[in-house]
Amino acid sequence: MVTPQAVLEELKKVKYPGFNRDIVSFGMVKDIEVGSMGVNIILAPTTAREDVLQQIHDAVTATVRQMPGVAAVEVTVTAPEQPQRRMQQGPTGVPGVTHVIAVASGKGGVGKSTVAVNLALALIGLGKRVGLLDCDVYGPSVPLMLGLKERPKSTEDRRIIPLHKYGLTVISLGLFVEDHTPIIWRGPMINKLLTQFLREVDWGELDYLVLDLPPGTGDAQLTIVQQVPLSGGVIVTTPQDVALLDVKRGITMFQQVKAPVLGVIENMSYHICSGCGERAEIFGHGGGEAMARQFDIPLLGEIPLVRDVREAADAGKPLVLTQPDHPQSQAFRSIAARLVAEVAAHPAQVLPTIH
Ligand SMILES: Nc1ncnc2c1ncn2[C@@H]1O[C@H](COP(=O)(O)OP(=O)(O)OP(=O)(O)O)[C@@H](O)[C@H]1O
Ligand SMILES: [Mg+2]
């Protein structure tokens, strides 16, 4: 007969869906009973998502069943623990914040952080009070784009004081992760940091809090958007990647948390020559528009590809501020105005925040 230790060792081979870590290291395995009738494994759920739990259930059953000497396997998933109960009641809002908007992308490198930063600043230009929460723990691109280096301080009662730049209230998770933290640990750290930052940061009174999500629309991103009631989500894409599937996944992710998709932003939509100002549609044009029509969501705008934006980003001085008349800055301003209108068009999603 097998021993519970042998079963536990075997379960270390079962990966948590979407993660590189196994279910044992996630603390999911609560008990293993080996009896004459077979093996009974008790799992504590770490997610409310039925499809993920089913996947884990099936993988555990298959893994243990193939062990020599195992006649039958039963997998029991216990009642959800505290976090799930909280989830069922719905996540609570961020103190002082009226609207939380998440910026997502199916792929990395499409310009999500560039959009999040410039959009946030354009919203300030419209007279809104705006915060930016950079949820990317893999590379501190937002601090770089805004020229921020210092780590936020905390008050005596352990509230975190956010950084302020160009009128924007900013917190970047990347600033709290030590440089030597291995990549595989960064993902799981996001949620712990995020829960803390959503509730323990002194955001002040904000009309909008923009979340710059890590690239992708998988479980990790879903867990983030589950933590707070969103007024809506925005999906950034590029013409090369007018990957319908990517946008569809983004829409599905926001639907899962019952947040409206406020629209798609097509970045690097066409090229504007920094010398002559000529416009060239090097990747073809109209993809974003066609996609928006297909999914029946607004195309919030198209942002040109220009060399200046990268230079502005690298210098920590976003283009919206340094060159307000630039076509790209105009694009960001018009997107910001459109976004405000879309948020107003979905008032049912505005949940009360707890002060
Ligand atoms: N419209 C644009 N024109 C020119 N360069 C751009 C434009 N948008 C983004 N970039 C540049 O492309 C690079 C990637 O942009 P950014 O970091 O915003 O992407 P991201 O989607 O946030 O990436 P990640 O997936 O790593 O988070 C940066 O160097 C940025 O300056
Ligand atoms: Mg980014």
Image (tube, grey):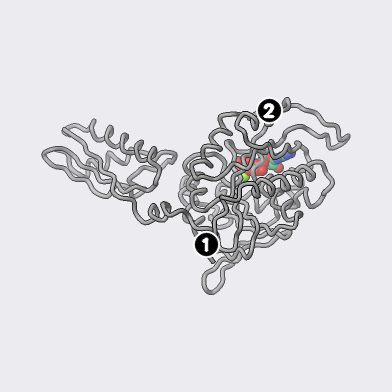
Give the residue displayed 59% in from the left and 66% down from the top: 202
State which image quarter holds ligand 1. top right
Q: How far across and how far down the image is residue 183, in percent?
A: 50, 46
Give left or right: position of 38 versus 23.
left
The quadrant of the picture occupied by the N terminus is: top left
Q: Residues within 10 Å of mark 2 (few under 14, many from 20)?
A: some
Q: Is residue 18 visible?
A: yes
Number of callouts: 2
Give the residue displayed 73% in from the left and 25% down from the top: 284
Give the residue displayed 40% in from the left and 42% down from the top: 49
The quadrant of the picture occupied by the C terminus is: bottom right
Give left or right: position of 308 versus 218.
right
Q: Secondary structure at mark 2?
A: helix
Type of amino acid under label 1: Arg
Q: How far across and how far down the image is residue 290, in percent?
A: 67, 28
Q: Is disc 2's CB within 8 Å of ligand 1?
A: no
Badge 1 is on which residue? 199
Is residue 86 or residue 245 the one in the foreground? 86
Q: Is residue 114 visible?
A: no
Circle number at residue 68? none
319 to 131, vertically: above or below = above
Give left or right: position of 141 versus 279.
left
Is residue 24 or residue 132 the one in the foreground? 132
Circle number at residue 287? 2
- Rendering quarter of residue 16: top left
Q: How far across and how far down the image is residue 174, in percent?
A: 57, 53
Type of amino acid under label 2: Gly
